[in-house]
């Protein structure tokens, strides 16, 4: 049984609110979970203290038990100091210039340098 610390959506249409839960990786996103560990309200400003609320002692317990946090929750835990901050790419791979465009950019740079 793979345990995940992930977000479960709640709230009304166009007014999202998420619960941070520990769940079996096979259960649905908004379905069965084992324990509620906190909440995330994206409608609040980023600096608001109630935007992300986490029960730190329970999160550390589940991380020690082998649970894996999803990418978004891992960022929350990293900012809270409960886990190492994950590394992520600001530039998605899909939108990166392709091979021919990179070759043209190198040729243009070489032409301007010469």
Image (spheres, rainbow, N blue to C red):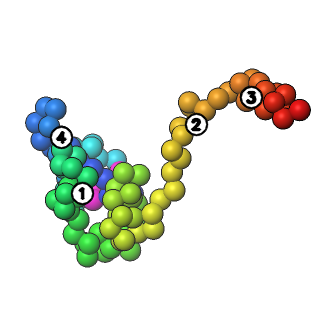
Residue 10 place in picture, x, y as percent: 15, 43
| Lower sequence index among marks 3 and 1 | 1
In terms of secondary structure, where does tag 1 sit?
loop
Hey, which quadrant is residue 109 in on the image?
Answer: top right
Q: Residue at 38% x, 74% y: name it.
A: 64
Instruction: Tell me the quarter of the image containing the C terminus.
Output: top right
In terms of secondary structure, where does tag 2 sit?
loop
Q: Which residue is mark 3?
A: 105
Q: Is residue 49 above or below residue 42?
A: below
Q: Which stretch did the figure color magenta?
A: 21-25
Q: Which mark is residue 16?
A: 4
Left or right of residue 113, residue 101 in this image: left
Marks 4 & 1, CB-CB < 8 Å contact: no
Question: How far is disc 4 from disc 1 in space, using C-alphas?
Answer: 18 Å
Camera-nearest label, 4 or 1: 1
Q: Residue at 16% x, 32% y: name it.
A: 14
Question: How far is disc 4 from disc 2 in space, using C-alphas?
Answer: 28 Å
Of 106 and 12, which appears nearest the observer?
106
| Lower sequence index among marks 1 and 2 | 1
């Amino acid at each position: 049984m793979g345990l995940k610390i992930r977000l479960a959506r709640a709230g009304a249409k166009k007014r999202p609110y998420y619960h941070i839960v520990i769940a079996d990786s096979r259960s649905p996103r908004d379905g069965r979970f084992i324990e509620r560990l906190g909440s995330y309200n994206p409608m609040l400003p980023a600096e608001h203290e109630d935007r992300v609320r986490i029960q730190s002692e329970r999160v550390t317990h589940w991380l020690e038990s082998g649970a894996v946090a999803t990418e978004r929750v891992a960022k929350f835990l990293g900012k809270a100091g409960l886990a190492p901050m994950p590394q992520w790419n600001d530039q998605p791979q899909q939108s990166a210039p392709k091979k021919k465009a990179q070759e043209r950019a190198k040729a243009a740079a070489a032409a301007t340098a010469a």
